[in-house]
Structure formats: structure tokens, C-alpha cells
Image (cartoon, grey):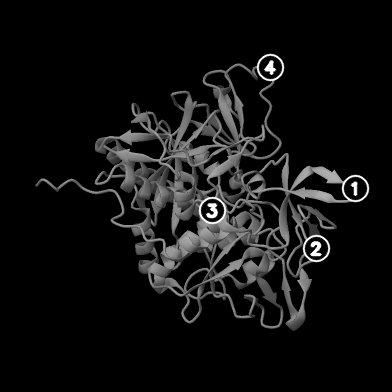
């Protein structure tokens, strides 16, 4: 009877590919055209200063670190990009029509996180 | 239930990141980065406490299902702010055919301090997050810090079992897609979906990725398609139904909805009837159906009633998430002006979260399928558990 106490825990937890994904996401940004910049660092000739991704990853009301999409990078500065995220194969309202009569972008309206 | 401080493991941040918690730090409004995963303290429970909580969760879940049934049979969709007739019909049909529709998980938020009965604050049954940290880093933390101890946490096993059991309900011959919104920069939605996908794979399901934004509509075949133009027959979406039914593709969702048993061409998980459970109007309807139930707080839809002068109240928008839009009203504060909010709200008795060492605590109790499955604890500095909350591990001693 010594081991009769009921267990409320999983016997084992195997993460499989999820661990690899997490490692890949923390090791480098998943999107090469996206850089974390200091929004307050704008310089007329050089653009924005690139800062560590951690400044952008953990915020919903960021004051400082902001993702900057596209543009060209020179040293630790980037210019000619945009703070607005480019939508994949989508533009305007209600998505776009690509080849094959397929439209995309009809879900997701820039509302941010869906969870709660 | 006790709070204990403890020295964090060296390298804890890298450890929990490898275990899926890539959002282990949170940036606060003052610009500082503070741990979201906080192992500088933990909570301990007795087995008796956890077993009592399990029973409460089981009963609350049963009551919610009964309340959902009440809404469908009496047609009280307007009380939930569901005014679109097509949406109401889809939800009602999903509820009637629920045995044919896979449904996976939900999270009850409870007010509990180890003394009186747990009080239900809300139920997130459509798109709950904070799953990864509860199922994975918390479990590994226990393995390292308290080997051989127990934890209220069978999430991993139960999720795999739920997929196995419900795999027969999935349309054959096509992978189950896992979709998150790429608008979530934090990575939390992505990792939640990645974790659920992993559990489905371990259950033997054929799975694939897509983001909500990438999902395509093929006008020719009248079907949703992936990036390679393959039909999406079934999709787990970490994306709330109220957006799915109002986005540009909403009409297509309803037109093609597989509401169980192959009644359409795309089946969504969680199913449409979860819209009933995640709506905060349910709190008021539950109170109406079970007045003075020990695990419920008085809640109303038409205003705060006498809560305005007795206990104070909390106004929660019917569809808010992560504490957004929630306002707290101390008793008497609005005596001269107990004005209703513009948007439809649920007015719930103010039951301040208990403080342990000055931290306000809320318990997230997980349900997988219809069974209690685990616990996650969040602490916050204020009375609203928002996106600045911290997750702390627990153990049963």
C-alpha cells in the first residue's frame, strides 16, 4: 500500500520537435528581414540603430525596441525600411487575389495575440 | 497552499527556453525586463487541497456545459452579444453535434487562498494560453527541484490521450493543420500551437503548420487551401471564434463549416460551441441558474445591482482577454454614478485576489476534454491578472 497514493502528474514529458523549434527561435530571428531597432535612435543619414532582439520580444507596449521590417543594414544601423509589418501575399482590404484564383489574408487583422 | 522562496536554478532562462518558454521575460511599462517565468518562489499544496480543487473544476465544467445547453435550448444568444443569426445557428448546430466534433482544452481562472472554497473568475475555453509553461517547464522544474514529488499536471499525457481518442472524428486523408496568428510577436501563440501540434503528433496524427494569415480561399473549388493549394480539411486554430466569424473570410467559414460528421469541408478546433463557454455572459447566466453556489461569484448582465454599494464589482467586457478592458469598482465609489459601460459587460462581485507575500495570485486550472488536468499559477502586482503577470511553479507536498 506504500505506493497507493495517486499520481496527478504526467509520467513523462517528451517535447520532440518543439524543443528544436524553441531553440531555433531563440537563437536567431525567424525572419531575416526583421530587425529590432531603437525607435528613439533615428539619425538622418544612418537610420535606426539595431539593438538586441530581446528589446523587442517581451513587450506589448514597447517604448524603445521596435521591429523594423526590410531596409538595408550598414554596420549597426538600418534605414529605408518600415515599422509596419509587410503582409504576406496580401494587400488592401479583404486579402488579395493571386494566381489560381486563390485569395489570402482574409484572416488576421493585426489584432495581436489571440490567446488569453 | 503556501508560498516558498527558493534560489532559481543557474541558467534557468536558457533551460525554460529550451523547454518551449521562449517568452521567459516580459518588458514592463517602465521599460525593464522582468521574468515572466519566475522560479524565485513556488507554491506547495497538500494532496487534499488539490483533490478538492479537482472536484470543484469537475463540477464547474459540468455546470458550464449545462449552461451552454440552456442557452442553446432557450435561444439566449443575444445575451452573449451573438446577434448574427447565421453565427447563432452554427453555434447551436455545433452544440447539438458536439459528440462528432473534437474539442481539446480550456482553463478556469479561480480565486483561491487555501482556506475557503475556490471562486470562479472566468473560463477561457476557446483560445487559452499559458499552457506551455504549465505542461512543460513546470514539470521539468519539479523533476529537477523535487524529484519524486507530485504535481497537479497531467496535461501532457491527457492531451496526447485526447487526440488519440478523438482522431476518429477527424476527416481522413488530410493533415490536421495547426494555425496561429503571425501578428503575435511574443512567440507565445506560436509556441502554444507548436506544443499542441507536438502532442497531436505523439498521438499518431498527421499534422502540418500554417498561419491564419496564410490560409487561402480558392474561389474555384470553394475551399480553404494551404500554401501548396492543398485543401484544409481540419484545422486547430489559436484564434477566437468571434474573429473567425467577423473577418473577411467569415462568410466562407460559415459556408464551408464542417460542423460534425462531414457536414462541410473545413472542420475547426476548438469547435464553434466553445464560443458559448468563453463568453463572460456565462458567468451571469451561471449565477442565475445556480444562485448562491459556493464556487460562484454574484454576476449580472444588466448592471452591478447592489454590488455597487456592498462588495464593489468588476466590469468585464463579454469578449475581453488578458485582462483588457476590465475595470474595478470599489464599494460606494460609484454611488452617485453607477453608470453602465457602453460595451456589453458582465458585472461580477469584486473578490480581491489573495496576496501571498504581497503578490496577487490566480490559479489557472486546466481541463482537457472533460477532465481536470493540471494547474498553473500566475502572480501579479495588481488585482487584474494582465500581460505583466508572472508564472510560478507548484508542487504537491
Q: Residue at x 43, y 37 (%)?
A: B110
Residue at disc 4, secondary structure: loop
Mark 2 Cα-neighbour bin, 10 Å: few <14, some 14–19, many ≥20: few
Task: Tell me the distance, in whole angstroms, between the alpha carbons under discs 3 and 2.
Answer: 25 Å
Task: Tell me the distance, in whole angstroms, between the alpha carbons under discs 2 and 4.
Answer: 45 Å
Residue at disc 2, secondary structure: loop
Residue B187: % across, % down: 58, 54
Q: Is residue B266 above or below residue A111?
A: below
Mark 4 Cα-neighbour bin, 10 Å: few <14, some 14–19, many ≥20: few
**Residue B273 visible within the image:** no
Instruction: Find disc 3 in the rendering and name its residue.
Output: B127
Residue at disc 1, secondary structure: loop
Residue B388: % across, % down: 58, 37
Mark 1 Cα-neighbour bin, 10 Å: few <14, some 14–19, many ≥20: few
Instruction: Find disc 2 in the rendering and name its residue.
Output: A93
Task: Tell me the distance, in whole angstroms, between the alpha carbons under discs 3 and 4.
Answer: 38 Å
| Subunit bearing disc 3 | B
Tag shown at residue A44: 1
Amino acid at each position: 500500500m506504500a505506493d497507493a497514493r495517486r499520481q496527478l502528474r504526467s509520467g513523462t514529458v517528451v517535447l520532440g520537435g518543439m524543443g528544436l523549434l524553441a531553440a531555433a527561435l531563440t537563437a536567431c530571428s525567424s525572419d531575416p528581414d526583421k530587425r529590432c531597432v531603437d525607435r528613439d535612435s533615428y539619425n538622418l543619414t544612418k537610420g535606426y540603430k539595431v539593438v538586441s532582439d530581446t528589446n523587442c520580444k517581451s513587450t506589448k507596449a514597447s517604448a524603445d525596441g521596435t521591429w523594423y521590417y526590410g531596409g538595408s543594414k550598414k554596420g549597426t544601423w538600418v534605414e529605408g525600411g518600415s515599422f509596419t509589418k509587410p503582409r504576406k501575399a496580401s494587400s488592401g482590404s479583404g486579402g488579395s487575389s493571386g494566381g489560381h484564383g486563390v485569395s489570402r489574408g482574409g484572416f488576421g487583422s493585426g489584432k495581436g495575440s489571440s490567446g488569453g | 497552499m503556501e508560498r516558498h522562496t527558493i534560489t532559481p536554478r543557474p541558467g534557468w532562462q536558457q533551460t525554460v527556453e529550451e523547454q518551449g518558454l521562449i517568452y521567459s521575460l516580459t518588458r514592463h511599462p517602465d521599460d525593464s525586463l522582468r521574468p515572466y517565468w519566475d522560479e524565485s518562489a513556488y507554491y506547495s499544496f497538500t494532496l487534499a487541497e488539490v483533490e478538492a480543487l479537482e472536484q470543484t473544476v469537475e463540477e464547474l465544467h459540468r455546470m458550464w456545459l449545462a449552461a451552454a445547453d440552456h442557452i442553446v435550448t432557450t435561444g439566449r444568444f443575444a445575451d452573449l452579444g451573438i446577434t448574427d443569426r447565421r453565427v447563432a445557428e452554427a453555434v447551436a448546430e455545433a452544440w447539438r453535434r458536439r459528440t462528432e466534433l473534437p474539442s481539446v482544452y480550456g482553463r478556469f481562472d479561480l480565486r483561491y487562498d487555501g482556506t475557503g472554497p475556490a471562486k470562479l473568475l472566468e473560463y477561457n475555453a476557446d483560445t487559452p494560453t499559458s499552457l506551455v509553461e504549465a505542461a512543460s517547464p513546470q514539470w521539468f522544474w519539479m523533476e529537477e527541484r523535487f524529484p519524486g514529488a507530485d504535481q497537479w499536471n497531467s496535461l501532457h499525457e491527457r492531451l496526447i490521450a485526447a487526440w488519440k481518442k478523438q482522431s476518429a472524428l477527424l476527416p481522413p486523408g488530410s493533415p490536421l493543420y495547426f494555425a496561429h496568428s503571425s501578428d503575435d510577436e511574443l512567440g507565445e501563440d506560436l509556441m502554444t500551437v507548436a506544443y499542441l501540434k507536438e502532442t497531436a503528433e505523439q498521438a499518431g496524427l498527421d499534422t502540418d503548420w500554417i498561419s491564419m494569415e496564410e490560409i487561402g480561399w480558392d474561389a474555384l473549388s470553394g475551399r480553404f487551401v494551404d500554401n501548396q493549394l492543398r485543401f484544409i480539411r481540419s484545422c486547430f486554430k489559436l484564434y477566437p471564434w468571434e474573429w473567425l466569424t467577423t473577418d473577411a473570410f467569415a462568410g466562407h467559414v460559415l459556408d464551408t463549416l464542417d460542423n460534425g460528421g462531414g457536414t462541410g469541408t473545413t472542420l475547426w478546433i476548438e469547435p464553434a460551441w466553445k464560443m458559448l463557454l468563453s463568453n463572460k455572459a456565462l458567468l451571469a447566466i451561471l449565477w442565475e441558474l445556480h444562485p448562491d453556489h459556493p464556487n460562484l461569484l454574484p454576476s449580472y448582465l444588466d448592471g452591478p445591482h447592489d454590488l455597487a454599494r456592498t462588495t464593489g464589482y468588476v466590469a468585464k467586457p463579454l469578449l475581453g482577454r488578458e485582462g483588457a478592458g476590465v475595470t474595478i469598482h470599489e464599494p460606494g465609489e460609484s454611488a452617485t454614478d453607477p453608470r453602465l459601460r457602453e460595451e456589453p459587460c458582465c458585472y461580477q462581485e469584486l473578490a480581491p485576489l489573495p496576496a501571498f507575500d504581497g503578490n496577487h495570485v490566480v490559479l489557472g486550472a486546466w481541463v482537457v476534454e472533460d477532465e481536470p488536468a493540471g494547474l498553473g499559477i500566475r502572480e501579479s502586482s495588481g488585482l487584474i491578472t494582465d500581460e505583466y503577470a508572472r508564472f510560478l511553479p507548484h508542487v504537491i507536498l
